[in-house]
Every structure is written in structure tokens, then in C-alpha cells.
Amino acid sequence: MKTITFKVLSLLFVLSAHSNATTIMYKNFHELIDESQYVLEGTVKSIVAKRHADGRIYTTVEFHDAQVLDSSGKNDLSQPALIRYIGGKEPVYDEEGIYSGYEETYVPGTPELEINERYVMFINKNGESIMPFLGWGQGIFTITNGNVSDLSLYPVVDLLDSNLVLLNSKSENLANKISHSKITESKNHSSAPTSKKVSTRSTDLNSKSPDLKNAMTLTELIDSPISKRNRMHRVKDTKKRVSHKEFSNWISSRINKQEKATRINNMHDYSSLIDLPKIKGPQSK
């Protein structure tokens, strides 16, 4: 009988070493746009965790059909985009090349992405920061059936001042997700064998969110990692949904109004999205 072993290392020491990472501060929609270096859109092609020369495990996510949003609209990237963050599961193989388990570096609060899903992401210091998604999970939105939801699948229904308005229910998106998974599974079944869907592990920062009723703002809550929707408006029921196109227009319009020199200088320099710097070992100069 073959024994499969697992080794898990929690990177709490990394979080404590970076004061900004111990508490995930709330970012409203305008702050996500203004403070990001790039607004990237793409579909996840692969999620690969690997130990690098510094001894740490990093996860690299490859996005195909990648585009960068700016004041002029969407700009196609000539190559797949690569986003790297610390942590993840690295598969371990024995001397015969047979899978024997995995080693995992677990970082609490790491966003969970999935193969074949399409996302809009607010990126800052990719390849340098331990978490290039601005605001961690706050800086990632998923596109489902042409509409936009946050990473926890709560649909975006409006923009009020600088805050997004989210529907207080995600049941429809879960149903769409299940339906999409069944279609994908059916296609994979009828074709050549493919690898199983892989996703990074995460801690659901929204699991303790209070049950909000109707439209309200939680101004009484202090910024904390409990919920990225602390001060976002919530509505109990509405038929309105924000389309992918409308969401993109909001972003381009905001960039156009708040154009900054740093963003202008980086507008057409997408090198950090397609060419990640090599991670050096402790002895490297």
C-alpha cells in the first residue's frame, strides 16, 4: 500500500512580518482603481505552485485572452498574463516519478481562483508583492453569464458614490456555476483525459459577515479582515445586474477622470504582467 504524505506550513510569520497584511483594509471601488497599477481581465488557464530558490512556495496563475483596461478601453496582451503570489500546494513525487502527496504553504486570506473562470483584477506590484491582488480578495471580480460578481459570487447591481452595491444573495450565481461545471465536466468526459480542476486554498473572509437587510451601509464596523464588504451597500432583492460592459465602462471612466502620471507612464508597459522576475536564493546577489 502506497502512503501519501502531506506537509502544511502556515505562513503566519510572513503576515506578521508585513504589517499591512495582518489586517486587510477595506477598499472601495474608486480606491481599487486609483491605487492599482493595472486592471487586468483574463481567464484562468493554469494554477501552478512551485518552490523557488529562496526556499518558499509561490503560486503562478496563467491567464489567457488577457486584456488590460485603461481610459481608452481594453488592450489585448500579446502573451498570457502571469500573476504570482506567495503560498500554495506543491505536488511531491518519489524517485520513480509517482505522486506521493504535496507540501503546502498556506497564507490566510489568499483568494481562491478556479480554472476556466474569467476575472477582472486590480493588480499592484506583480512579482514583487506577496499578494499582487490589491486588497487581496477585494480586488478580484468574476464574470458569469455576462454579469459581474465579487469573488464570493455576490452580484454587483449598482455603484453608489464610490461603493459598489451588491445583491444580498448569491444563489443564482451558485446555480450558474454548478451548471457551468457540469457542462465542462461533460466536455472533458467526451474528449481526451484532462487534469482535475485545481484551486488555491483560501480562508473565506466573508464567513462571519452579518446578515444584512435591504440597502444599508455598515459605517459602524472598523476596517478588518472579517468582511471585504464592511461598508459596501447591500440590497435584499432587485432584478438589476451590472453587465460586464457596464463594469468595464465604470473602470475606464474613472481612470480617465483620475489619470495619474504613474498610471500614464505604465499605461503601455505590461512587462510585469507577462515576464515575472526570477526569485533569487538567499546567497544570490
Image: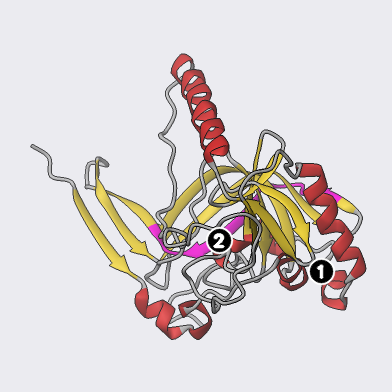
Pick the front one: 269 or 39: 39
Q: Say which residue appears at 83% left-offset and 71% top-offset.
A: 263
The picture places residue 132, in percent across and down from the top left corner, at 59, 67
Q: Relative to 274, is 15 on the left or the right?
A: left
Circle 2 sits on which residue?
A: 137
The picture places residue 161, in percent across and down from the top left corner, at 79, 66
Q: Relative to 108, is 216 on the left or the right?
A: right
Residue farthest toward the left in the current orientation of the protein: 1
Q: Say which residue appears at 68% left-offset and 62% top-offset.
A: 122
Residue farthest toward the front in the current orientation of the protein: 214
Using a 10 Å C-alpha cutoff, classify the residue at mark 2 as few (fewer than 14 neighbours), some (14 to 19) or many (20 or more): many
Q: Say which residue appears at 42% left-offset and 63% top-offset.
A: 87
Bounds of the magenta span?
74-88
Callout 1 secondary element: helix
Above or below for 105 versus 93: below
Q: Quadrant of the N terminus?
A: top left
Circle 1 sits on which residue?
A: 266
